[in-house]
Amino acid sequence: MLIYTLLMFIMGVACAGIGLALYPILKKYNEGLAIGTVGFRIIEGVGDIVAAICVIALLALSQEFVKAGAPDASYFQTAGIVVNAGIDWLSHGAMLLCWCIGAFMYYSLFYQYRLVPRWLSVWGLVGITLVTIGGVLVMLHVIPGFGTVQLLLNLPIFPQEMVLAVWLIAKGVNSSAVAYMPAKTATNERLSAA
């Protein structure tokens, strides 16, 4: 559990870092969506850290239960159910939605300005839409968190995110996308390069 919690903390920092790393690129095309991407990725990262703290709280609660010997189990069970519900709601609903909103913003910019191949952007937009549907269904308690339905809805985005990461590392964004920039932004980019 401690390794899982440490990985959640690292994931929280990484999520915020992705938004911050994309900001300089995305702001050239649409500053509002670039700020939105950063904001939602930071919210997602904070959510990851809060969920990790909840896991630590659940672990502490279970240790207190063991130390107490044979206590009134209903108190510990109720507290455990509440903490676990908070973890589920955060991890499988709220954080996913923040990630989806931020990702939808950058996939839209990737698609509109052809920063990555369109097939990769469309794959991301479809995958994020499915993940969003799953996250909303979990938050409304229609389906269980990371049950079969949500895992199936999340399936297309997992390989897409890996392909996107490899693409961005290997090839970066399309440098000829400047031709697709709004006129004012493209002019400012050309003036600042001169």
Image: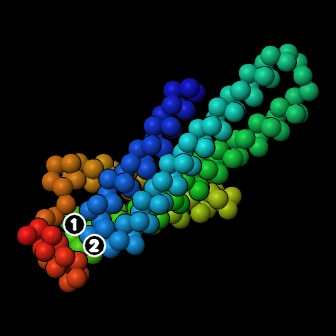
Indicate whether 34 appears above or below 158: below
Whether pointer 2 and pointer 1 mark residues with C-beta atoms closer than 8 Å, the reply is yes
Residue 62 coordinates in the image, percent (x, y): 74, 26
The residue tagged with tag 2: helix, strand or loop?
Answer: loop
Residue 29 coordinates in the image, percent (x, y): 27, 73
Would residue 14 be visible to someone looking at this image?
yes
Residue furthest to the right in view is 72
* Relative horizontal placement of residue 160, taking residue 46 as reference (left or right): left
* Relative horizontal placement of residue 11, taking residue 177 as reference (left or right): right
Q: Badge 2 is on which residue?
A: 29
Q: Give me the residue at 16% from left, 49% from top.
A: 170
Residue 71 coordinates in the image, percent (x, y): 90, 22
Q: Nearer the viewer, mark 2 or mark 1?
A: 2
Marking on residue 7: none
Marking on residue 115: 1
Q: Point out the image quarter for the N terminus.
A: top right
* Relative horizontal placement of residue 151, taking residue 14 as reference (left or right): right
Disc 1 residue type (three-letter): Leu
Q: Earlier in the sequence, mark 2 or mark 1?
A: 2
Indicate whether 120 appears above or below 190: above
How many numbered circles are shown? 2
Q: Give me the residue at 80% from left, 23% from top.
A: 65
Residue 131 coordinates in the image, percent (x, y): 48, 60
Disc 2 residue type (three-letter): Tyr
Along the viewing direction, whichever of 48 and 189 lies nearer the viewer: 189
The residue tagged with tag 1: helix, strand or loop?
Answer: loop
Crowd class of label 1 (few under 14; some 14 to 19; many from 20; radius 10 Å) = many
